[in-house]
Amino acid sequence: MHRDPLIQIDIISIFPQYLAPLSLSLVGKAQDDGLMRIGVHDLREAATDRHRTVDDQPYGGGPGMVMTPEPWGRTLDSVLTEDSLLIIPTPSGQRFDQRVATEWSQRKHLVFACGRYEGIDTRVSDYYRERVEVAEVCIGDYVLSGGESAALVMVEAITRLLPGVVGNVQSIVDDSFADGPMESLLEGPVFTRPANWRGLGVPEILLSGDHGKIQAWRLEQAQRRTAFMRPDLAPGGTPESGAVAH
Ligand code: JDQ
């Protein structure tokens, strides 16, 4: 019996403890089951001065500090191989979405370079782009204080797509965005017991046992919700007109 070559993920950060949740829940279980391996590396171990400095003032002036390239160079030289994809979370990168997660879940080695402050000296991505594939990615249009939480998000999205991680294969296929956001539906409403909770019931059709009718009803509910919550995804939807929550 042959097995897919297991994916290795390395994450570099000045806050390695920020990545501790990766030993919990789904991602922790995937590692325990031998479906993936995650290594976390402290960037400061590659700093050589007495104060383990990893930042410096920006050339040209301005507020904040920039991560200095030397510790990144030493750490990345020791972690990268010719099969690596180097992923740099940044607010000025391309959007990470389900399509990207699916592509990356099929790679052998992912290396996340988590910056802090105003980001990493641009020459680090320039240098490694000549040597390995580099992806500068943003997880959404909001500003974080560093790359660690973005790396947690991406690792979780990728892990769910690894063979053997999510028990029921159909549940992956049915999930929102499974085929990439272009041709997708949001999840419709879900219910479990009790059949009456604080005076609120469950749609009769879900109790009917008619799986053909249930499937059709769920599709209609999903389409209604998509049109309302995400008109940009719905057929004929306008990219900029979002629904206001109520
Ligand atoms: C870093 C920062 C530049 C704020 C430093 C490293 N989607 C997404 N939002 N924010 C990030 C990603 C992100 C990723 C890495 C980061 C933010 N910062 C702080 C840097 C301008 C503003």
Image: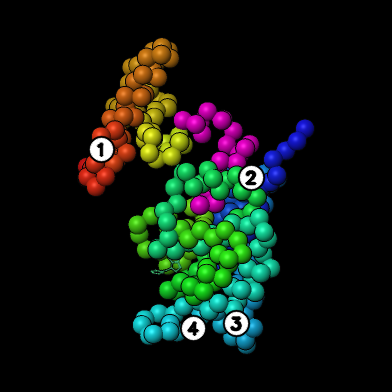
Q: State which quarter of the image contains the N terminus.
A: top right
What mark, if any, has residue 237 been given in the picture? Answer: 1
Q: Which residue is mark 3?
A: 52
Whole-Å distance between the Cαs marked 4 and 1? 46 Å
**Is 148 located above or below residue 108 in the figure?**
below
Q: Nearer the viewer, residue 136 or 56?
A: 136
Point 38% across, 35% down: residue: 183
Q: State which quarter of the image contains the C terminus.
A: top left
Q: Which residue is mark 2?
A: 30
Q: Quadrant of residue 167?
A: top right
Q: Nearer the viewer, mark 2 or mark 1?
A: 1
Q: Amino acid at mark 2?
A: Ala
Point 65% across, 63% down: residue: 80
Q: Nearer the viewer, residue 2 or 129?
A: 129
**Magenta segment, which residues?**
154-174
Mark 4 lies on a secondary structure that is strand
Sooner in the amino-acid sequence: mark 4 or mark 1 = 4
Instruction: Judge the density around disc 1: few (<14), some (14-19), many (≥20) Cα neighbours within 10 Å.
Output: some
Instruction: Tell me which colouring the rendered structure shows.
Output: rainbow
The percent coordinates of residue 143 (x first, y second) are: 37, 63
Q: Amino acid at mark 3?
A: Arg
Q: Are marks 2 and 4 in contact (CB under 8 Å)?
A: no
Q: Is residue 19 left or right of residue 36?
A: left
